[in-house]
Amino acid sequence: MEQPIILNINDENPSTGLYLGLDCSSKAIHGVWVDQNEQLVTKCKWGSSKKNFEERFLEFGLDFWVSLSKIKVLLDDIAPIKAAVEAAIYIQNPKATIAIASVAGLARFSCHFNNIECEFLDNTKWKRDILGKGNASKAEIKAFAVEKWGAENFPEQDFADAACIALWKKRRNS
């Protein structure tokens, strides 16, 4: 279920770095890259419509693993990549929490396996640092992302989250 990778590099000197934000759920991994100028470079989604988590996880997890190695080769010629993945949050349903933690762990391990510096990031930390409010709502996150990068880039809320995570990683490394 791989999707084509379209790059939109606007940076005059991208060799200073690209920053990947990863937002994970039990159904998909959303990834967004921003450059040194905080411009959105590209975004990807790896997901599955299978009903059972175990089947979904294996399908989109493998797609992510394979895609990330290709993306790494493609983007490494342009600039080094640094990443952050949102750490799993505790949800009232332990099964959902475990599923999201599994996906986030896979995402981080895939980054490390591909020599991409990656760290877990608490959702309240990036929300506080980027939006000024650790408990920002989904609507506030999307409004910020749309104002910064345009509505056409955010057909799904998870892309807005991933973009803000990438922005946090960029600002932390500047």
Image (cartoon, rainbow, N blue to C red):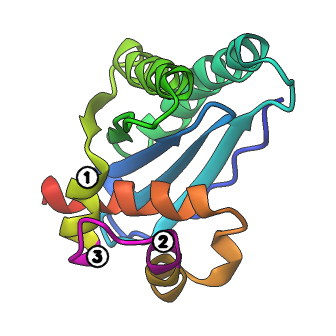
Residue situated in front as seen by the camera: 40 or 56 = 56
Q: Nearer the viewer, mark 1 or mark 3?
A: 3
Q: Considering the image in quadrants, where does the C terminus appear?
A: bottom left
Name the spot of residue 71 as percent of width and height, x first. Answer: 56, 33
Q: Which residues are magenta?
A: 131-142
Instruction: Please name the residue shown 20% across and 67% down the image.
Output: 128
Left or right relative to 55: residue 87: left
Disc 2 on helix, strand or loop? loop
Report the amino acid beneath label 1: Lys
Q: Which residue is mark 2?
A: 10
Q: Pinpoint residue 88: horizontal percent, then vertical percent.
A: 39, 34
Nearer to the camera, 22 or 81? 22
> Which residue is the site of mark 3?
131
Give the percent coordinates (x, y) of residue 133. Answer: 24, 74
Q: Residues within 10 Å of mark 1 (few under 14, many from 20)?
A: many
- From the viewer's perspective, is the residue at label 3 or at label 2 nearer? 3
**Location of residue 70 (image quadrant):** top right
Mark 1 and mark 3: Cα distance apart in space:
14 Å
